[in-house]
Amino acid sequence: MSYELTGKLVAKFDTVQRKETFKTREFVVEKTDEIGGRTISNFIKFQSVQDKTTIIDKVNVGDDIKVHFNIKGTKWEKDGKINYITNLDAWRIEQILQGGAASPKETAIDNDYLEPLDTFTASSPDAIDDLPF
């Protein structure tokens, strides 16, 4: 399941090579809400992994952003003690422009996953009419 959060980027950290084949990068987003006439700020730390560690490069500290992320949890045991770890794994970032709209270049569909429409060709004029609806 995927989630999203909008806030201000307040920190971004260097990429850390955890193992030879695994790297992570963390960043922090400030989420501010008005509750009962008071302004409440939360600071949420996200991580991105592997090829997603560069998604934070396109935005600057101070920018308003929308983060798309998954929640992942791990059970870790050592010396008879159990610990549970929760990670917010970011996989996409959109820069929010003044007025609240997301940057058009960031919301565009990733064409790496789409087949070009002009590659479809029907074998005969009746082939399109075979659709069951």
Image (cartoon, helix red, strand yellow):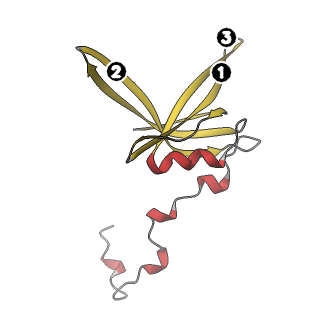
Depth check: give the residue in front, 23 or 129. 23
Q: Nearer the viewer, residue 110 or 131?
A: 110
- Does 23 sit left or right of 97 as displayed? left
Mark number, residue 33: 1
Q: Residues within 10 Å of mark 1 (few under 14, many from 20)?
A: few
Q: Are marks 2 and 3 in contact (CB under 8 Å)?
A: no
Examine the image and state in which quarter residue 98 appears. Answer: top right
State the residue position of label 3.
36
Quadrant where the C terminus sits is: bottom left
- Which residue is labeled 2 in the image? 84
SS for dot 2? strand
Residue extending furthest toward the front? 20
User: Please, what is the three-letter code of the amino acid marked with disc 3?
Assistant: Gly
Amino acid type, residue under disc 1 in the picture: Asp
Which circle's residue, 2 or 1, is located before the other in the chain? 1
Q: Nearer the viewer, residue 37 or 97?
A: 97
Residue at left offset 64%, top offset 27%: 30
Q: Indicate whether 114 appears above or below 32.
A: below
Q: Residues within 10 Å of mark 2 (few under 14, many from 20)?
A: few
What residue sits 76% from the left and 41% below the top? 99
Q: What's the distance in space between the residues labelled 1 and 3, CA to CA? A: 10 Å
- Identify the residue shown where x is 44% and y is 80%: 119
Q: Please provide percent x and percent y for residue 111.
A: 51, 64
Number of labels in the image equals 3
In the rendered view, tell whether residue 129 sits above or below residue 102. below
Q: Find residue 85 and name its label.
A: none
Q: Amino acid at mark 2?
A: Tyr
Q: Secondary structure at mark 3?
A: loop
